[in-house]
Structures are given as C-alpha cells and as structure tokens.
Image (cartoon, coloured by chain):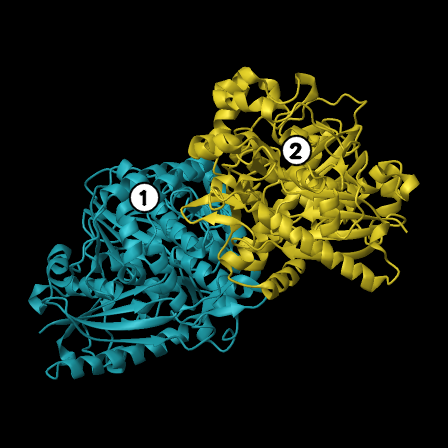
Chain colours: A cyan, B yellow
Amino acid sequence: MAVTLGLDFGTNSVRALLVDCRDGSELGTCVVPYPSGDQGVLLDPRDPHLARQHPGDYLKTLKQSMAGALAAARKARPDFDPASVIGIGVDTTGSSPIPVDRQNRPLALSDRFRETLAAQCWLWKDHTSHEEAARITALARKHRPHYTARCGDTYSSEWFWSKIWHCLNTAPEVFDAAASWVEFADWIPSVLAGVTDPAQVVRGVCAAGHKAMYAKDWGGLPDEEFLALLDPKLAALRPRLYQEAHDASTPAGSLCPEWADRLGLPAGIPIAIGEFDVHYGAIGSGVEEGVLVKVIGTSTCDCAVVSADKKIGDIPGICGIVEGAILPGFYGIEAGQSAVGDIFKWWVEGVCRGDASLHEALTAEAAALRPGQSGLLALDWNNGNRTILVDQRLTGLLLGQTLHTSRAEIYRALIEATAFGARIILERIEDYGVPVRQIVCAGGIAEKNPLLMQIYADITGREMRIARSSQACALGAAVAASVLAGSAAGGHDSFPAAQQAMTGLKEIVYRPDPAASRTYERLHQLYQQVHDAFGGVATVDLGRIMKELLAIKEEASR
Amino acid sequence: MAVTLGLDFGTNSVRALLVDCRDGSELGTCVVPYPSGDQGVLLDPRDPHLARQHPGDYLKTLKQSMAGALAAARKARPDFDPASVIGIGVDTTGSSPIPVDRQNRPLALSDRFRETLAAQCWLWKDHTSHEEAARITALARKHRPHYTARCGDTYSSEWFWSKIWHCLNTAPEVFDAAASWVEFADWIPSVLAGVTDPAQVVRGVCAAGHKAMYAKDWGGLPDEEFLALLDPKLAALRPRLYQEAHDASTPAGSLCPEWADRLGLPAGIPIAIGEFDVHYGAIGSGVEEGVLVKVIGTSTCDCAVVSADKKIGDIPGICGIVEGAILPGFYGIEAGQSAVGDIFKWWVEGVCRGDASLHEALTAEAAALRPGQSGLLALDWNNGNRTILVDQRLTGLLLGQTLHTSRAEIYRALIEATAFGARIILERIEDYGVPVRQIVCAGGIAEKNPLLMQIYADITGREMRIARSSQACALGAAVAASVLAGSAAGGHDSFPAAQQAMTGLKEIVYRPDPAASRTYERLHQLYQQVHDAFGGVATVDLGRIMKELLAIKEEASR
C-alpha cells in the first residue's frame, strides 16, 4: 500500500488527509481549528477590513492534525504503516503573504513582532489595502496594461503587492525588517523541507501568476521600473523575492528529518509545490480539459484548464489565466463569485434571524415554487462581483417584490441570482475558447443543497455532477504528491493517471428540466439586462422589466 | 350648542362622530366593524383580485355606531341633546359602485342575489376588472383622449366603468337586473334622505369626476357613442345613471322620518353630499389653496385645491383634477401612493414575521441611522405606482445591500422610498401651477411615527404639520354638514369659516434638518434615476449608481 498526505490549510482550520494511491480511498483525516483570534482570524475592532493569522498557529495545528489523521488511519486499517506514506501535498488560502526574516522565519514568531498585526500572515480576505490596489490598477493600466489584462483588468486588494505596499505605508518597521515575503502556500512546504533561507523557497506559479503579476513571458515579477512607480522600496524588494515560479511538476523539496520526526513520517519523501486550495480542489475533483470545476461554498471558485499548446488570449473579466497554475502543461483558468453561501446566510441568519432549521424550512418552501413564480429577480452582488465585472464596489439588488412576497421567495430568488451569475461566467469562458463538456461541483453547498443544484442545472442548461470526495482540496494535494512520488514508489507517473485512479464523481446527476430551462432562459435575459445596466457595461432600457417579470409570474402561477 | 354628525365609512368599519360646530371639539364617537366576510370584505378564494362588501352591513353598523356616538356624547356632556344635531355629512371609500333596483335598493338585499358576489358593493380595492380597465384606457386614448387626460392618462380597474363592464361580462344576470348603479358615497346619503328611486339620488361630483369620467364641459358622463364601443348595453345604461353631479354646496337631501327615528336624530336636518373619505379628510385637515393635505395610512392620498377661476390644465400623471370634488368653487386635485404603511407592514410582518413590538424595535434602530448610512435605495412600488406613473404593473426594488445589511436598514430605506415618492408628487403638482405653501399630514402613520415624519421633512425640504383631529375624514364630513346647515342654525356660512372654527393643527412641527436634506438631495437624484429607468420614463445610465450609494454610505459612516 502506498499512501500520500494532503494538507489543506483553510481559513479557520487545517485538515490532514491520508489517501490510498491505488483508488483514492481515504484512510484517515483530522481537522484542527487554528487557536488564535476569532476562529483563527486576528481582527482589529477599529478596522473591519483587517484579517490576519498567526503563522505559529499553522505549525502547531499541522502537527496535531497529522497525529489525528495517523491515529484515524491506524484505527480504520490496523495494518496501516506510516512508512507507507510516499509524499506530501499542501494547499492553502491565498493570496496570504507572510513577511519572513533571513532564516525564512515569520517576523511574527520573533519577540519583537509577536503582537504586531502587520507582521502576521496577511489573510486572503484582508482588504485593508484597497487604496493601494486601486493605485496599482491605475498605474498598471497606464504603464503596463499587459500586467492587469491577465488578471481581469483590476488588481485586487486581496493580492500580494497591494498587501506588501500597504505594510510599507502603514507599518514601515515591519516592511524594513522583512528579508522577504513568502506566500502561505509556499511557506508551509518550505518549512517541511527545512528551508532556512527565503531565497531557497521554491515558489509556486499558482500564487505568483494569479496574485503577484508574475509571468515568464515578461521576465517574472513586475519589473523594477514599474515597482519604483509604486515605491522605490518595492523595487528594492524585488530581488529578494524570487526570479522563477514553478508548476506542480517541480517538487518543493523533501521532508526534512526534524519535521519527519515531528509528524511521524518517513524523512526524505517528496513535497509537492504548494497551490491554492481551490486549485488542488479542482485536481481532486477531476479537472481536465473540458471539465469545469465549481467549488461552491461561502463564495464560489471556478477552475478550468486548457492545454498550453493552444493559444488562448486574455479573457475579459477573468481574474487569472496562468500557465501551470493548476496542472503542469495547461493554462489554469480561475473565475469566481464573491458571495454565494454568504448571501443565503445573510438572508436567513442576518435578515430573517433564523438558524439552520430556517435554512431547511425556507429551502423546502422555495423548492415548492415553480421557476418564475415569485416574480422576483436579484443580483448576486452583495459582496461585489469578481467575475466577469471584477468590481468590488457593486452591491445587491432585488426587484419584483409585491406586498405578498415571502421570505422563501426571496431566498429562492437569491439562489437563482447566483445561478445566473454562474451562467455568465460559463458563457464568458466558452466564448473565449475554453471548452466545457462537463461541470463538476464540490464544496458543502453542492453536497447539501439539491434545490440549488437543480436550479443551477436548469439555469445553465447543463448537467451538474458532484465530486466524489468531500475533501477535494486535500485530495488534490495528495494526488499531486502521488505524481511527484511516481509509480516506482507506488504513486503515479502523470496527473491524468493519478486522477483516474484517485478521484471520481458521486452517482447523482442533476439534469436540466426542459420546461424550467425555458422559463429561466427568459429570466436570464432580464438578469443580463440588469447585470449590464448596474454593472456599467451598457445603458439599457429597463422600462419593461417589471412588467415582463409579472407576465412570467402570471404564466408560472397558472 | 349646535352639533353636526360626520359618518366615515372606511374599508373595514364605520365611524360616527359628533362635533361641536363652534370649535370642532368632538363630543362623542363610535366605530363599528362590518360583520360580514374577512374584516368586512367578501373575498373569493379563487380570485385574489376580488373584494366586495355587503350593503346590508353598512345600514346595520350605521345604526350601531350612531347609538354608540350618542351614548358617548351624553356621557361626556350630560347636557348634550340629540336635538342639537343640525346636519349630517357622509364620506365613504370609492369608487365602490352598488347595483340597485328601481327602488334604490341594492340587489344584494334581494333574496335572489343575496349570495351573489357580483350583486354586492364592488369595493374600491376590487381589481377583477383589470382587463376592462385596459380596454377602456386604450379606447379612450384612441377615441376620446380628453377623457383619460384628466385621470392621469390611465383608467383604473378600481373605477366605476371598469367594474360595471366587468359585471356585464361575467355576471350578466346581475347587470340586467340592475336599474342603476350608485356609488357608495351617494347611496348612504340617499338612504338617509329616504330616496326610493335611483333617478332621484343626488350624485356627488367627487366620485363622478374622479372615477366615472364625468365632466360638465363634455356633457356629463362619457357619451353613448363611446360607451357603445365598450358594449352597447353600457350605452343603454347611461340614461339610467345620472345627467348631473354636484359639489358640496348642494344638499343630498334631508333626514327622512324613518331614519331619524332609527338614529335618534331630528328629522329634516340637511344631509351633505357624499364625498370620498380622503376628500372630506382634506377638509377636516384644513385644506385650502396653498395647503397640501397628505393622508398617510396603508396607502397615501394627497389632496390640494386651486381656485376654479384659475385655469389649470391637465397635470401628467395626476389621477384626477375635478372642479368641486373637494371644496365648492375649487378644482380638487388628487394624487397618491398605492402603498405606504402596507410596505412597512409587508416588511415587518410579512418578511420579518414580527408584530407591533418589532415595528417599534426596528423604528428605534432605524432612527439611530444617519441619512445615507445604510447605502440602500428602494422604490416604493410594491403595490404599483399611482402617481405620477399611473402604472399598477410596477413592483418593488431594493438596491445597495451587502452581506451586512440589517432588517432595520431596509425598514428605513422603505420609509425613505415612500418619502422620495411623495417628493415626486409634490414637485409634479408645483411644476404645473398648484401652489404648496404648507403640508398638513393626517392618518395613523403621521400621528404615530415621528421618524417617518422627520424623514419626510428632510427629503421634501418642507415643514410637516399634522391635522389636529385624528378623525379628519369624519370631521370634514361634519364641517360640510355645518356649512349646509348655515349660521342661522348654529353652523357656518362658508367652508373657510367652518374650517377656521372647526379644524386645526397639532403643535408639533417637523422641520427639515439642513445636513440631512443635503444628503437626501443626493439620494433623491439617484431615486429619480431608478424611478425613471424602471418606470419607463427614460433610458438611464445606471452604471455608477451602486458606487455613488457606497460613496454616500462611507461619508455618512464617518
């Protein structure tokens, strides 16, 4: 038996997952929440945009989750031997950069900066640097339009350079003390590999290409002349970051004796390059050319791959197209919706003040409605629009309400809104040459909400499938580890072979209902009009839209 | 002491009010709910548009409420003598036509039609005849554009001809049995006056002019040629309706001995012409040229008057401009919002599932917000738009919501939406030459919700006053009765004199706050854009609106 380990560092906890390389069966898993702050997140009561994490939490919980997973595996299979673990894969949130010293130690682990928020890991959802992001966007559009073209024309406050620049602007002592900055996804593998010099950290192209404007064709990171337009100190930092970033065919290193001892695993086993959670999640869900993976949770991330032999250009409004970001030899294409589950949670818990049982009751009530029957149309922009408008400064919209509109009708309209948003993304990538033969969903909402899945099928007109594993991210990391270990060690020699063996789909298939799809086709036209009008895409005549919704409602109510 | 009686027939109950003619003090009052149906309204489970009332309810409750008011007056003033009652005024809902036989008896009181819904009073909010209304609008626009020009360019399903035609189309046996149709507001005075022939019923110009396309300048009701385009049977009905309609200077008759006996009042006292509740409500609130009266309840009705000597033309989108409809010698101008209190009720009770205590809690929370702080903007069209768009087929809209938007923020946004709608009406009538020097509000919401009143002041930039009497409608009817009785009998010789003596304002004044008004000025511009875009008035570029709301929100939150 050959086993690989997937480590999935999420927003609130870390998961360790031991996977049998032969068939992807999960031998043992364990989740440990980060101990610090609010559910692992360090907050600042004076600034709602701030979200940081203490890097020490990662190391402590990594050890605990590993021990838990090993114990679970031993319990499930008494013959399990930790010596059969042949490789490690790591995924994390991102962009979550960490300032480190010359020994690759996070500044936050030093006495000087232990309590300093700017010295912690800058969690992906930290938005303190929105002004820097706007400035970078403006400067890049003017001086280096190709930089932003590849990230949807807008550089985000969630990303690498915005955060580092904000640190320079607001906590210069931290900036000055940092020898380098390392993405969370790169830092964990480097720790396991015993790397004690940030220059030696193997950087993944996933984080570099999607979040740091890295591209081989323009020579790596943004050039110093451009960075000097931001701040000369950023230009001076560039050589201390990295010159090259790698895809998952390059190992991040091999397990150092110290961490092998700590984790109870064999020293020297290969460690795969770190990728973001959804990217390895796409691999764990079976992504390949023609398969779109949608990870549906609080927000949604869409991943697809296209062979690097094909020349696909920039796709307007798509946040990132990065060669090797998901699978080696393929462009990785990432899109997403800024809020999905979060919108339902807002409605049910925030507005209706209910709990899980109200989620269930409203779902049941909403499921009894026919498409179009509510007369409502909503925009899914309560947290802005990531794809295809790439605009944080958009908000929600609901229209069509009467004096009889119920909370369940609004609940359903919000689900439908996220489905219309999903269709817009799907159509955009297909229009620009990304084939989508099959859609595979992953994430808690996909598994738990059949109503949503059916509405997605009806609105997109596509079958919806669900990834077999509920731990697709950790599984994808384990897949990457198995490829790195190779068939000689009991792993696999290619991603397709590893995915074929280790990943799969659940049996359930959500098929579009033709009658529902016809009604939703009409509603989608209206959604598109409102989307374009409020998204600033076009000036649209909206004078008939309420009447058309009423007409659809009346037909649906007959 | 001279006393007049105001009888106010509302949607769910009747109120009798005894008023001292010297100073308007209220001697005694009593409200009795109608016994039939759902809170007095006969419904059809198969048709949500249907709303009828049993005319027998009116007579039964009239007697009860009169007895109650007399008892209350005797209790309050032991020296009170019913013989001091010198006149009666009546207001009712409308357009609420009643089919009657040759004896002016409602068909619904006959054995044959007692259970027949089409033979009952067709309550104002009955919308079963929307198809007939659309057909009348289309035919009038084509053949008699001046007919609809005076009622906002659209003939409503709530009005006289739509309802009668719908009766003809769906219950021809009732139509054929009807000798005539009498408005509720005309029928009650005719009963009190002992009129036993529908041709002898004195018709008020208020109902005739606002709801039946009656105008002196084109010879009364719509001509037979036009009615024949609808249906020849309607043309044949015309001579059995009425040739002339009157303002409040003409009496509807005098109290017949039979009803004098039933009510315990002196026989022979004059009965004023019937008007709609809000019209007499305007009089009871002190309407005169320059004063706009807003009756704010489940919906809002705005009333103003302009001297008939002035030539004011049609005002686009204003439902009705009828000479003598409110005060003799003045054009009565009526506008309104289809839902105001109903929208708050929908939100608090329908969506948030709360009761009166939640209304209070949300009001307190909403009052703590600064203008613009919610980032929200709503349209007040959950029940369509009466003025100035005159379009039932419009619906609600809410925009600007984030993942943190609270139910109290939405509650406040809905209040603001109704205030923006009120401002649109105010600006429209002023633009067309109706002077507004003072705004006087009446109705439960005006009295009970200081937050709403302050928002109305801030958004309109005008002082808001409140009518002194909480029974402005019944008081206005009593004022009309006092004028009819005249000073010789202890009443008054003119409406200004009677209003001067009998009506007044509460002390409280809601004054616009300059800072709030500045913020609301910006929000009103955005409201206007969304109003025009979804109202079909104009094609508007809405691409910046969410960003502008966010900018206002951020400024307001500082």
Residue A414 place in picture, x, y as percent: 40, 51
Residue B318 place in picture, x, y as percent: 65, 31
A117 on left or right of B479: left
Disc 1 on helix, strand or loop?
helix
Q: Check whether the beta carbons of the residues at disc 1 and disc 2 lie within 8 A of each other.
A: no
Pointer 2: what residue? B207
Mark 2, other Cα within 10 Å: few <14 / some 14–19 / many ≥20: many
Pointer 1: what residue? A423
In front: B550, or A21?
B550
Mark 1, other Cα within 10 Å: few <14 / some 14–19 / many ≥20: some
Image quarter of residue A193: bottom left
The three-letter amino acid code for the residue at tag 1 is: Arg
Q: Residue at x 51, y 68 (%)?
A: A43
In front: A308, or B113?
B113
In front: B65, or A253?
B65
B364 on left or right of B380: right
Q: Disc 1 and disc 2: Cα gap in Å?
A: 53 Å
Q: Is residue A283 above or below residue B544?
A: below
Residue B126 place in picture, x, y as percent: 52, 41
Residue B449 seen in render: no
Q: Residue at x 21, y 41 (%)?
A: A435
Q: Residue at x 30, y 50 (%)?
A: A455
